Each structure stands twice: as structure tokens, then as C-alpha cells.
């Protein structure tokens, strides 16, 4: 165990116990999830953030690769009341600093009251509060990471063959279980880099253009937005999105996004479907929200703060979710989203066959 310091943008330096050494900086956020630490730590949407777990004991059921959502840990550092040795070893091996023995209630309250904030981290045998402050000094705001997509996307296109509708999944930092949720339903999935060209997508001749989740500010994903702009009016292509994907789709159809104070991160966020009135529990991880849905209808809202959780347009064949229907971690209540997306794609595909 070593010394560990967190320098917060509000001027405070918090001391903890070092569990994995290193220095880091990022946007301090918290998740209230009481399970799913492996999925959260490997979710690419946490790139450039420092993740605080409000649940006190992290690591209770070990660390298993099968639960990973990507090939590496994405938060720049991890904070908890208590990490098990398994988690501390994993984060050390990944070179991601970890600190525990913290008053995480205080950290969460600070972020709730003052909003997600920059922080600097220093963990090691002879680190000082000054080292953490130095990291804080170098910390950029989330929106300043203008090419964050390049850090999390696939290096080149991947194709998973299937008999179902063809999906062009634009990988802005996609969680693995979005790909597997589509494949399990028979979809023919092309995973494309975040900067894929319109021609590449057109060559695939997709039934669905699907924009994935991903880190940072949706305004920094101009290429994905222009792909939606190019295909959304095409009657033969359905458009779908999850989380960052919903935000990008909304921006592409004349809508807008804004930063939330501290966001939604957890596994029990209640969402109401406006048509059925049904409330489902959802997994969430986002710090931006759709402030204006543009040409789309808001179909689902967050019960706590009324923010847009689902958007759709029958006319444009669009369906999106702000939360994570792939449910890793989290309740399976909304897995049906993937069936809805593929059905929409199938309808679009049939229209094309008739048109041909
Ligand atoms: N999980 C996500 O796709 C996150 C979307 C976006 N980066 C946000 O923070 O709002």
C-alpha cells in the first residue's frame, strides 16, 4: 500500500490509500452501480474520466475476462471505499491508478453539488499532494478532447456474418455486448471505425445504420453525425443509436445536446415509456443529454429528471436509447430494443427489395 492523493478542481486535496500506482487526470464522476464493476471499468465511454464507485465494496465476486466490455480499462483512475486485492492487482497490471479508504460519500456529494469536475491523481511510495495538483493543472475539459473517438474505435472494419438484417455499426467506443446483442439475434454486423466514410457505409448497403455509445462530448463526433445526415432521409435505411449514438442522431436531425451537472451513472435509473406508461429499470452512463430532439419524438423519459431516454421517428425510421439496453451490467428489462431495431431494419430492407 502506498500514498495516494486526489486534487480536486474545488481546491481540495483528498488523501487515500494507494492500491495501484501511477499518475492520472480526468473528469471526476461517480456511479451508483452496486454490481458490474468489471463492465464499468472496461466500458469505453469512461475514457478520460476518473470513476468513483459509491458502492463501498468493489471486487466481491472477482475479476473475470468474460465480463469485460472491451480489451482494456478505460477510466484514467478508479476510486472506492474498498477495493479487493483482485481488483487492485488487475488495475495495477493495467497501469491504472486506484485509490481506496476514501470517504466516497463526500466525493459523491461534492460532485452532486458542484458537478463533474477536473481532478488530478498521484499514487506511489513517495508522491506528494503537489504531484496530484500538477496533474490537475494539466487536465483538459471533456469537450477539449476533440478526437477522443480515435482512442476507442476499432483500428479497421470487422465483419460478423449473419442471416438477419445488415447493420453498419459505427464504433465510437462500442461496448462489446452491443455487438453480441445484435449477433445473437442473427444480424449481419459490420463494425466500422468512427471515421468511416459515407462510401464505405454505402458499399455495405446496410438495413440499419447504428451509432454506438462512446466517450466525451457528442459535438466532437462530426463524422458520425454526417453519416446520419447522409442516410437518415433514405427510406431504405433505419437509423439507431445508443447513448452517445442517441445524442449524435439528435444533433444530425436539427436537435441539440448539453452537458448535465453530474450525469446518470448506475444500474437502477427508472425510465418511463410515454406510450405504454410502463417504467423499466435501466443501466446508464452519460454526462450529456439531448436538450432538443430536432425532428424526432421523445418516446421515453427519465422518471427522476424528465430527460429524454428514447427518441423515434416513424417517418425517418429512427429509434434510439439514451440508456444501455444491452444491460451489461444491469437489468435486462429493455433488451427488446435490439429486436425493435432489427425489425425496423427488416422493414426498411423489404422496402428496398420491392423498390428494386
Ligand atoms: N455511454 C455513452 O455513450 C456516453 C455518451 C457521452 N459520452 C456522455 O457522457 O453523455
Image (cartoon, helix red, strand yellow):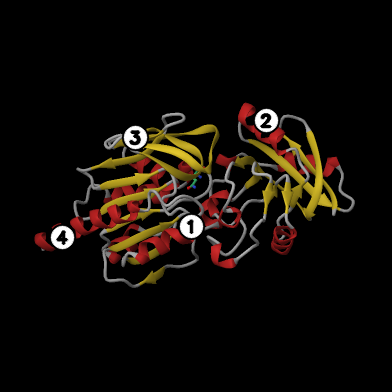
Residue placed farthest to the right in the image? 126
Q: Nearer the viewer, residue 191 or 319?
A: 319
Q: Nearer the viewer, residue 85 or 123?
A: 85
Give the Cα distance between marks 2 and 4: 53 Å
Give the Cα distance between marks 1 and 4: 29 Å
Other residues around mark 2 within 10 Å, as few (<14) / some (14–19) / many (≥20): some
Q: Is residue 192 in view?
A: no
Residue 110's disc is: 2
Name the spot of residue 160 as percent of width and height, x first.
Answer: 37, 71
The C terminus - image quarter: bottom left
Q: How many marks?
A: 4
Residue 293's disc is: 3
Disc 2 or 1, which lies upstream in sequence?
2
Disc 2 or 3, which lies upstream in sequence?
2
Other residues around mark 4 within 10 Å, as few (<14) / some (14–19) / many (≥20): few
The N terminus - image quarter: bottom right
The residue identified by callout 4 is 350
Disc 2 or 4, which lies upstream in sequence?
2
- Residue 297 versus residue 183 in the image, above or below: above
Give the Cα distance between marks 3 and 1: 24 Å
Mark nearer the viewer, 2 or 4 = 2
Which SS class for mark 3? loop
Which SS class for mark 4? helix
The residue identified by callout 1 is 175
Name the spot of residue 289 as percent of width and height, x first.
Answer: 45, 36
Amino acid at each position: 500500500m502506498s500514498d495516494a492523493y486526489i486534487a480536486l478542481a474545488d481546491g481540495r486535496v483528498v488523501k487515500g490509500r494507494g492500491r495501484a500506482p501511477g499518475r492520472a487526470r480526468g473528469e471526476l464522476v461517480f456511479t451508483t452501480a452496486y454490481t458490474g464493476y468489471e463492465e464499468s471499468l472496461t466500458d469505453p465511454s469512461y475514457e478520460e474520466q476518473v470513476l468513483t464507485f459509491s458502492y463501498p465494496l468493489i471486487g466481491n465476486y472477482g475479476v473475470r475476462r468474460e465480463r469485460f466490455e472491451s480489451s482494456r480499462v478505460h477510466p484514467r483512475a478508479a476510486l472506492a471505499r474498498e477495493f479487493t486485492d483482485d481488483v487492485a492487482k488487475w488495475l495495477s497490471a493495467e497501469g491504472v491508478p486506484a485509490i481506496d479508504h476514501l470517504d466516497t460519500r463526500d466525493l459523491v456529494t461534492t460532485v452532486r453539488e458542484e458537478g463533474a469536475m477536473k481532478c488530478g491523481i498521484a499514487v506511489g511510495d513517495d508522491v506528494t499532494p503537489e504531484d496530484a495538483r500538477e496533474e490537475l493543472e494539466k487536465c483538459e475539459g471533456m469537450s477539449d478532447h476533440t478526437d477522443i473517438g480515435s482512442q476507442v474505435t476499432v483500428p479497421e472494419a470487422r465483419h460478423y456474418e449473419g442471416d438477419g438484417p445488415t447493420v453498419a455499426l459505427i464504433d465510437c467506443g462500442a461496448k462489446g455486448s452491443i455487438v453480441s446483442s445484435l449477433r445473437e439475434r442473427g444480424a449481419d454486423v459490420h463494425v466500422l471505425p468512427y471515421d468511416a466514410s459515407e462510401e464505405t457505409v454505402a458499399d455495405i448497403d446496410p438495413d440499419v445504420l447504428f451509432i454506438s455509445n462512446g466517450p466525451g462530448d457528442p459535438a466532437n463526433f462530426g463524422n458520425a453525425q454526417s453519416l446520419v445526415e447522409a442516410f437518415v432521409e433514405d427510406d431504405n435505411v433505419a437509423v439507431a443509436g445508443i447513448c452517445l449514438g442517441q445524442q449524435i442522431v439528435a444533433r444530425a436531425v436539427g436537435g441539440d445536446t448539453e452537458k448535465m451537472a453530474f450525469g446518470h451513472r448506475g444500474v437502477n435509473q427508472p425510465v418511463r415509456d410515454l406510450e405504454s406508461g410502463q417504467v423499466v429499470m435501466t443501466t446508464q452512463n452519460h454526462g450529456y443529454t439531448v436538450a432538443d430532439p430536432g425532428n424526432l419524438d421523445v418516446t421515453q423519459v427519465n422518471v427522476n429528471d424528465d430527460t429524454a431516454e428514447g427518441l423515434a421517428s416513424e417517418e425517418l425510421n429512427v429509434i434510439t436509447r439514451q440508456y444501455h439496453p444491452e444491460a451489461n451490467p444491469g437489468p435486462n428489462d429493455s433488451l427488446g430494443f435490439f429486436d425493435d431495431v432489427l425489425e425496423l431494419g427488416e422493414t426498411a430492407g423489404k422496402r428496398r427489395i420491392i423498390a428494386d
